[in-house]
Amino acid sequence: MPNAIAVALVDDHPLFVRGLELLLPDVSGGLATVVASTGDASAAASLVRRTVPDLVLVDLHMPAPGGVRAVAAIRSTTPWVRIVAMSGDDDPRPAIEALRAGAEGFLPKSSEAEDMVRPLLAVLGGWAVLPSSLLAALLGSGRDARPAPADLDEADRNLLQLIAAGATTTEIALKLHVSERTVKRLTATLLRKMRVSSRTEAAALAGSAGIL
């Protein structure tokens, strides 16, 4: 784990942003620091490219183009950055859309600053972080809309197990004795087979279908 974690905020609530700027370094013992923020969802991708944070927190309920579009833009332009979506309400639909757009996790905005540190570290470590209620909603949507295909072969299942365990592309490449480029190609093929758009969704769908 790095000595310092640079966090960028995409949120149009100034008090929430200022609160994290003040509290996150304190509750993390100086490990996490907010290095940049914007209240404009359309500026999120350029902010991330310019400041190169380790992790981005994105509020989903922002003026157009909105938080989900911001997640997708960040994922497209800086695919190595970890993204955590946030929301102040209980509607799971925007959170599920954000996960499909490329977010690695979701945290409610009601979370205390000290309760955010461990989930953020987990996301940086390659894990997907979801509240249990959102995981249940995600699994339910997977069962209703995209049943997992029954024709996954052994190689597909091995790759899926590594993805579900939170392994990075580099770790998967070492485990399978292939290049990182090959891992990316195999992962893209697997996601198409499962009719999902992200590793998080693939792992959730595989767990709900009992194929891990």
Image (cartoon, rainbow, N blue to C red):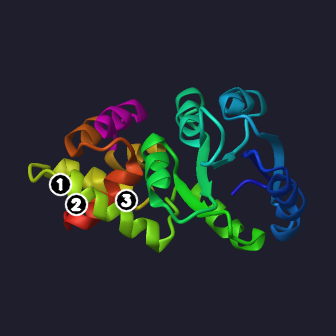
**Distance from label 2 to label 3 (Cα)?**
17 Å
Using the image as rendered, state which of residue 206 and residue 19 is in the foreground.
19
Q: Is residue 187 left or right of residue 115?
A: left
- The amino acid type of the residue labelled 2 equals Arg
Which residue does the numbered mark 1 point to in the structure image?
147
Check contact, mark 1 vs mark 2: CB within 8 A.
yes
Q: Is residue 47 left or right of residue 62?
A: right
Q: How many marks?
A: 3
Which residue does the numbered mark 3 point to in the structure image?
164
Most prominent secondary structure in the magenta stretch? helix
- The amino acid type of the residue labelled 1 equals Pro
Check contact, mark 1 vs mark 3: CB within 8 A.
no
Instruction: Indicate the position of residue 10 as horizontal and vertical percent values.
Output: 71, 43
Instruction: Indicate the position of residue 14 as horizontal and vertical percent values.
Output: 84, 50
Residue at 60% across / 46% down in the picture? Answer: 82
Q: Is residue 131 left or right of residue 121?
A: left
Secondary structure state at the residue bearing disc 3: helix
Residue at 49% across / 61% down in the picture? Answer: 91
Tell me which segment is drawn in magenta.
177-188
Residue at 78% across / 50% down in the picture? Answer: 13
Instruction: Indicate the position of residue 146 as horizontal and vertical percent values.
Output: 21, 51
Which residue does the numbered mark 2 point to in the structure image?
143
Using the image as rendered, state which of residue 73 and residue 211 is in the foreground.
73
**Distance from label 1 to label 3 (Cα)?**
17 Å
Query: Alpha-carbon neighbours of circle 1 within 10 Å: few (<14), some, or many (≥20)?
Result: some
Residue furthest out toward the left: 151
**Distance from label 1 to label 2 (Cα)?**
5 Å
Query: Alpha-carbon neighbours of circle 3 within 10 Å: few (<14), some, or many (≥20)?
Result: many
